[in-house]
Image (tube, rainbow, N blue to C red):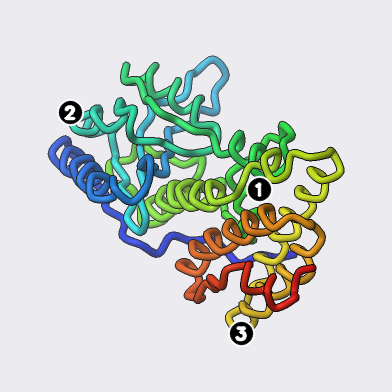
Amino acid sequence: MGYPTMTFEGQITYSRTAVEVEKAAMEVLKTLEAKKNEMDKNAVGFDIEWKPTFKRGVPPGKVAVLQICVDTSCQVMHIIHSGIPQSLQLLLESSSILKVGVGIANDAAKFFKDYNVSIKAVEDLSYLANQKLCGDTQNWGLASLTEKLICKQLLKPKKIRLGNWETKYLSKEQLQYAATDAFASWYLYEVLRSLPDVENLEKVTAANQSRATEILFDYLSLLCNLDKGSLQAIMTVFVTGVGGRLKSMVVVTTLWESVTMALGYIAWCEGLVAVTTPPRAFWHRGALE
């Protein structure tokens, strides 16, 4: 099935001098400070790029580009030219700012090797996805996770991915690529954190846990078939058909809240209007027995 392409259409700010990168990092810190009361821990989408090598025995280049995304704003910092200004180091070493991405521990290790800066408070989306989706140890990539969660295709053209990130100025295509990856990491984290852990949905019997897992995947299928004209109908199907399999109001409520929270992020991206009718209203109308 061919999914629509995921692209970042928010604000991209490109910085390449020490002064510009310092300003960009301060802007991120300012944004996160303003959001501090909205959630328990601030999270940013995080990714890095470097110039690859194609010669045996020649190590890859230093981290050349660092991208950080929050909401609809993405900072693309060309640190191969600027170095690591004080505010950026403060942001990276902060334990109160969660950096999210796929394979982020490896990125942090490379960054420390290249710049002697320790990136603290990191969370791997692959690990989080296994907690939320299936409880297994599947090795998710950013592209595969994007398809699974929101049915979008995250393009990874080799010409850009393996291009020269140490160039004097990044191209428009490189900026878009870098911003989209960081945005995808932030966006998928927001969707994932709205889902309950599979193992915590209903701890009664193995059969109940299996049904809960099945429901969670049915829910993802519903999200993949969303369109602007049938959102209410899809929600009704969820409660009467999918939710009706579990005779537990607590589980149905938890799943419903997860659905509407995740829908909120997708609605924001697609221009949809999320439905927030509480499940108990359906229960009282006899939709659930």
Q: Identify which amino acid the numbered label 2 is placed on.
A: Gln
Query: Can residue 73 be seen in the rendering of this structure?
Result: yes
Tell me how far mark 1 sits from mark 2, CA to CA.
35 Å
Q: Residue at x 62, y 54 (%)?
A: 254
Tell me the tag on residue 229. Answer: 3
For this view, does 56 lie left or right of residue 284? Answer: left
For this view, does 133 lie left or right of residue 260? Answer: right
Tell me how far mark 2 sits from mark 3, CA to CA.
50 Å
Name the image quarter holding residue 242.
bottom right
Q: Which of 195 and 6 lies nearest the eye of the viewer?
A: 195
For this view, does 58 lie left or right of residue 34? Answer: right
State the residue position of label 2: 86
Location of residue 196 in the rendering, given as x and y in whole percent from the top left corner: 61, 46
Outermost residue on the bottom side: it is 229
How crowded is the residue under tag 3: few (<14 C-alpha within 10 Å), some, or many (20+)? few
Quadrant occupied by the N terminus: bottom right
Quadrant occupied by the C terminus: bottom right
Location of residue 14 in the rendering, given as x and y in whole percent from the top left corner: 27, 49
How crowded is the residue under tag 2: few (<14 C-alpha within 10 Å), some, or many (20+)? few
Q: Which of 241 and 265 lies nearest the eye of the viewer?
A: 241
**SS at circle 1:** helix
Say which label, 3 or 1, has the lower sequence index: 1
How crowded is the residue under tag 1: few (<14 C-alpha within 10 Å), some, or many (20+)? some
Q: Identify which amino acid the numbered label 1 is placed on.
A: Ser
Say which label, 2 or 3, has the lower sequence index: 2
Q: Residue at x 74, y 55 (%)?
A: 248
Tell me the tag on residue 144. Answer: 1
Q: Which of 95 and 145 lies nearest the eye of the viewer?
A: 95
Location of residue 104 in the rendering, given as x and y in whole percent from the top left corner: 49, 31
Q: Identify which amino acid the numbered label 3 is placed on.
A: Gly
Of discs 3 and 1, which sits in the foreground? 3
Q: For the image shown, how many numbered marks are present on the structure?
A: 3
